[in-house]
Image: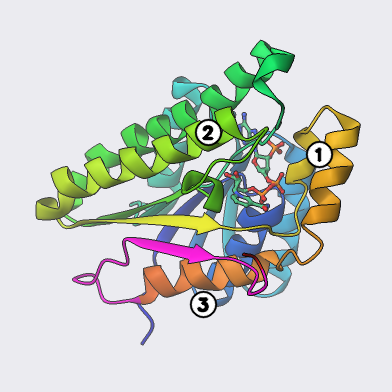
Amino acid sequence: MSNIQGKVVIITGASSGIGEATAKELASKGAKIVLAARREERLKEIQQEIKRNGGQVIYQVTDVTSYEQMETLASYALTEFGKIDVMINNAGVMPLSAISDLKITEWETMIDVNIKGVTYGMAAVLPSMKENKVGHIINVSAVAGHMVFPTSSVYSGTKYAVRAITEGLRQEECKNNIRTTIISPGPTSTELTNSISDLGLRNFIIESAKEAIDPSSVARAIAFAIGEPDNVAINEMIIRPTIQE
Ligand code: NDP
């Protein structure tokens, strides 16, 4: 039997893209899903679709930049489902820009969502996972967390940070039976490019990512990492278009 069946999985950034695809994939394999994001209408629609297909799913409107809201999310999962097996810190934004454009507010948003949001997600679930002596934290980085290109400096910085933080977590908590996984997607067809405020740059990025893969491929990679036995940790996966250099 799959090691996904019956697991309680929280997914941030579940209102679109990779988070939405992962919620549907894991629900179809019998996981109990807790959707989290800010857009309630989207969460409701995804909840209804998963329920129509026989899945178990609840949602909590959550801004990952608020530690209080992340704690509320974890408490809600514990109240409704009694445990948290997997936390997927997937919410992210990618307002790419050149450093010389000095888009300070966008840098701050990236740091708040992509780094602080991940740390808050880990903090919200670690106590209950350690109490149960088993758990799995999956943090979404990127190929841009392995390399830098012009306009990706701050975004890449946040994604390198996600990898560093997750590796530290692995070293500290592996003895407590906490599995960690870093997911590093390459170009994937989602709404992520909407956060690029420079329209010329946005169109350039969309154009140069024409070969982008479907988010369901990333979702299946995440399902694979969860589905392995609890004594096996898939610590990192890069999922990208075959054609990407
Ligand atoms: P989407 O834009 O489709 O999804 C991003 C999700 O993050 C949305 O559900 C959004 O929900 C949520 N989000 C953004 N800000 C917040 C916030 N403050 N609080 C809570 N949720 C928030 O993009 P993807 O699915 O592509 O992105 C998912 C992850 O994958 C990101 O971490 C991204 O960096 C990473 N990634 C994506 C790649 C790609 O090419 N698409 C490549 C490499 C990595 P809402 O607005 O409703 O809050």
Q: Please tell me whether mark 1 sits on a helix, a strand or a loop.
A: helix
Where residue 77 sits in the image (x, y, percent)? 44, 45
The label shown at residue 29 is 3
State the separation of the CA atoms marked 1 and 3.
31 Å
Q: In which quadrant of the rendered image does the C terminus lie?
A: bottom right
**To which quarter of the image does residue 61 belong?**
top right
> Callout 1: few (<14), some (14-19), or many (20+) C-alpha neighbours within 10 Å?
some
Q: Earlier in the sequence, mark 3 or mark 2?
A: 3
User: In the rendered image, which residue does mark 1 sit on?
Assistant: 194
Q: Amino acid at mark 2?
A: Asn
State the separation of the CA atoms marked 2 and 1.
16 Å
Whether label 2 lies within 8 Å of ligand 1 gets the answer: yes
Q: Earlier in the sequence, mark 1 or mark 3?
A: 3
Where residue 215 sits in the image (x, y, percent)? 67, 64
Of badges 3 and 2, nearer the viewer stands 2
Tell me the residue at 23%/38% (across/down). 127
Residue 205 lies in the magenta stretch: no
Q: Amino acid at mark 1?
A: Asn
Tell me the residue at 9%/53% (across/down). 175
Q: Is residue 141 above or below residue 108?
A: below
